């Protein structure tokens, strides 16, 4: 049922995304569209943890930053192709996510969220104030630039126009959606659903909650890392604030929650609605008013949590598949589900 | 590293750590009673600091006198935020159980609104208040001790004791503890649970009003200072044990001393990495925190 809904809504979106750059050839539009896709990709990667494990991470930007820096440094230092650097950076981000998750997933309560924020902010502040670490030039808050190789080179992840970047992130987004789809139907997906529904019950059935939550976190960190490395290549520049600041973590969270967490298309819908709003606010006020778009995000986030806990995807789903009520029940788990009645 | 520098670092760490603990008290209290992590905790501290700064800059009010305004103001802010923003969530939940992630996201929204409103109103400039007490130091055994920090430290200890005593012996305190233990049973015994929540949230924020004003004489004010204090508070309460008042002070002292001593060997920002490492180690060995009940 849900797969068909995803196709009904997703296919037209995909077709629109494929023809958009040929209808509007303006490079600003293509760049903005690529940014929407980038945020959709990041939110979808974030959704792996929040939507399926049920833990809110507000430190995912750290994974983006770690992988971004790794890929740029491997390229500038060793001449390694950013494509390989991207994968290695993602693996590094996943490896770093494991101890953070291991220490906190064993505990009930908000430990993971608090630790994730602290981790990301400490990493960012450290990076901003470190010019050199073990002989590696990190250049602190100034950031690193990716030296141009001149012209188009697939191996160096550098292209003349914006178009190739657009299609790369589109492919990545489709990839992460496919991964979400496979994960939902895999053993891991069912385990996570069980853990989220009733952790103690799942444990009694022999599911190790820490292990499967960690698997999902590592996957999510890996995917987020790929996005961070992509961002560094798109701008040919990386700095701690933009690539691992708390704003990025919050963007991912707000877009996913508003769009509909725990669904395949939800995060993309959230990015599709929110990123243009943020851009328009920024553009129309010409940077005179700092932070207004974040105030709007904050208000939208509060309203979404209070009144649309399933996100904007829920009403869409009802309109597009009216028969779904009588057939299979909704399998998504939402923020609002009361999980456990604690006795204190 | 001579003994004098080290003991100076330890004393400074203790003083600052006590203040960290004091700032974290409200976070711990709110979580202990409502099971809600207030992500906007640091933002409210920042709000108190701006309030104190404005009173000093416009009317020349000494930061310590501004406590008379900041504490009630922050109590009001906390009360309103709880009753307007968070209570709809609590009312909606069946069995009065708040799912922690929803409440956290909700307060993350509050953080976004508060921090960026202040950024819009005041810009990113660093502001500071200079008073007679800023550079005042007393000497104990040949070591200079900054008076403003000492006052902040003393206030943290005092507030922790007063809060524990009040929770234990006053009617309202009893009602708060009863609600924390079992809100349904508390409601059945005639306790007005929504009111208790509002008061608890207000109280947790009022403590920030106090420390905001106490920090102003020796801490520069920027719109982003809230987040850095908020994160320190998260570390402190998890270290000390979420919901424990003495744990909050102890966690603060530990973090303060560790940071201050580590900063003698490496840069202050690298020291923060070490304190995060310490935090992970403690979490692995004693998941409930130093004073928490497992």
Image (cartoon, coloured by chain):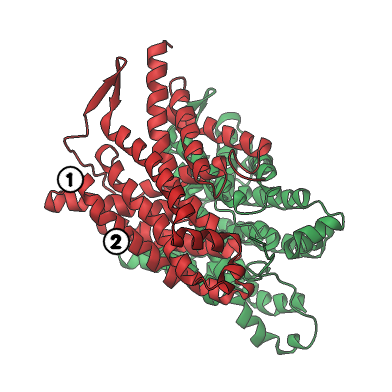
**Residue A118 position (above or below residue B41):** above
- Give the chain ID for the red colour: B
Q: Is residue A110 left or right of residue B5?
A: right
Q: Quadrant of residue A188?
A: bottom right
Q: What number is the disc on residue B62?
A: 1
Gap between marks 1 and 2 measured at Cα: 31 Å
* Residue B285 visible at all: yes
Q: Residue at x 67, y 62 (%)?
A: A343
Pointer 2: what residue?
A289
- Residue positioned most to the left: B59
Q: How many marks?
A: 2
Q: Is residue A296 left or right of residue B144?
A: right
Judged from the image, the secondary structure of the residue bearing numbered disc 1 is: loop
Q: Residue at x 23, y 42 (%)?
A: B128
* Residue A239 visible at all: no
Q: Colour of chain A?
A: green
């Amino acid at each position: 049922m849900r797969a068909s809904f995803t196709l009904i809504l997703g296919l037209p979106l995909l077709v629109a995304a494929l023809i958009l750059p040929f209808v509007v050839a303006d490079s600003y539009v293509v760049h903005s569209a690529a940014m929407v896709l980038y945020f959709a990709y990041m939110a979808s990667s974030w959704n792996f943890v929040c939507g399926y494990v049920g833990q809110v991470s507000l430190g995912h930007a750290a994974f983006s930053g770690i992988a971004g820096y790794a890929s740029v440094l491997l390229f500038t230092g060793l001449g390694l192709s950013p494509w390989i650097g991207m994968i290695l950076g993602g693996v590094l981000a996943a490896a770093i996510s494991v101890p953070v998750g291991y220490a906190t997933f064993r505990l009930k309560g908000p430990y993971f969220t608090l630790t994730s924020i602290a981790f990301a902010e400490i990493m960012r502040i450290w990076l901003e104030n470190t010019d050199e670490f073990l002989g590696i030039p990190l250049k602190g808050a100034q950031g690193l630039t990716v030296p141009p190789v001149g012209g188009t080179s697939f191996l160096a992840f550098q292209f003349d126009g914006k178009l190739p970047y657009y299609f790369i992130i589109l492919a990545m987004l489709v990839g992460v959606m496919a991964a979400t789809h496979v994960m939902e139907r895999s053993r891991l997906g069912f385990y996570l659903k069980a853990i989220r529904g009733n952790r103690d019950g799942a444990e009694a059935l022999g599911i190790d909650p820490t292990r499967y939550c960690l698997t999902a976190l590592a996957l999510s960190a890996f995917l987020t890392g790929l996005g961070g490395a992509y961002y560094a290549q798109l701008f040919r520049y990386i700095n701690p604030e933009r690539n691992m600041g708390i704003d990025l973590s919050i963007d991912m969270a707000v877009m996913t929650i508003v769009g509909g967490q725990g669904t395949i298309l939800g995060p993309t819908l959230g990015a599709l609605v929110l990123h243009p709003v943020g851009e328009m606010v920024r553009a129309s006020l010409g940077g005179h008013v700092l932070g207004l778009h974040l105030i709007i995000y904050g208000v939208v986030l509060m309203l979404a949590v209070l009144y649309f806990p399933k996100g904007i995807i829920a009403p869409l789903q009802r309109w597009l598949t009216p028969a779904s009520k009588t057939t299979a029940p909704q399998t998504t788990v939402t923020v609002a589900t009361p999980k456990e009645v604690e006795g204190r | 590293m001579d003994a004098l520098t080290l003991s100076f670092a330890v004393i400074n760490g203790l003083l600052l750590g006590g203040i960290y603990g004091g700032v974290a008290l409200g976070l711990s209290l709110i979580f202990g009673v409502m099971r809600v992590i207030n992500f906007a905790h640091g933002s409210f501290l920042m709000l108190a600091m701006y309030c104190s700064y404005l009173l000093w800059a416009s009317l020349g009010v000494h930061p310590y006198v501004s406590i008379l305004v900041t504490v009630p103001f922050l109590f009001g802010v906390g009360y309103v935020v709880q009753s307007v923003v968070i209570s709809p969530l609590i009312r909606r939940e069946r069995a009065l159980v708040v799912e922690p992630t929803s409440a956290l996201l909700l307060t993350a929204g509050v953080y976004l609104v508060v921090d960026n409103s202040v950024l819009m109103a005041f810009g990113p400039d660093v502001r500071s208040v200079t008073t007679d007490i800023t550079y005042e130091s007393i000497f104990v055994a040949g070591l200079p001790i900054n008076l403003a920090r000492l006052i902040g430290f003393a206030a943290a200890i005092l507030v922790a004791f007063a809060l524990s005593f009040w929770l234990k012996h006053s009617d309202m305190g009893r009602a708060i503890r009863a609600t924390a233990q079992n809100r349904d049973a508390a409601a059945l015994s005639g306790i007005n649970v929504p009111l208790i929540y509002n008061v608890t949230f207000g109280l947790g924020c009022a403590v920030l009003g106090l420390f905001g004003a106490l920090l102003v004489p020796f801490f520069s004010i920027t719109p982003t200072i809230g987040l850095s204090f908020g994160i320190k508070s998260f570390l402190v309460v998890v270290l000390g044990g979420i919901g424990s008042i003495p744990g909050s002070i102890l966690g603060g002292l530990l973090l303060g001393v560790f940071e201050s001593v580590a900063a003698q060997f490496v840069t202050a920002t690298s020291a923060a990495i070490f304190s995060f490492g310490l935090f992970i180690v403690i979490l692995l060995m004693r998941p409930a925190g130093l004073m928490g009940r497992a």
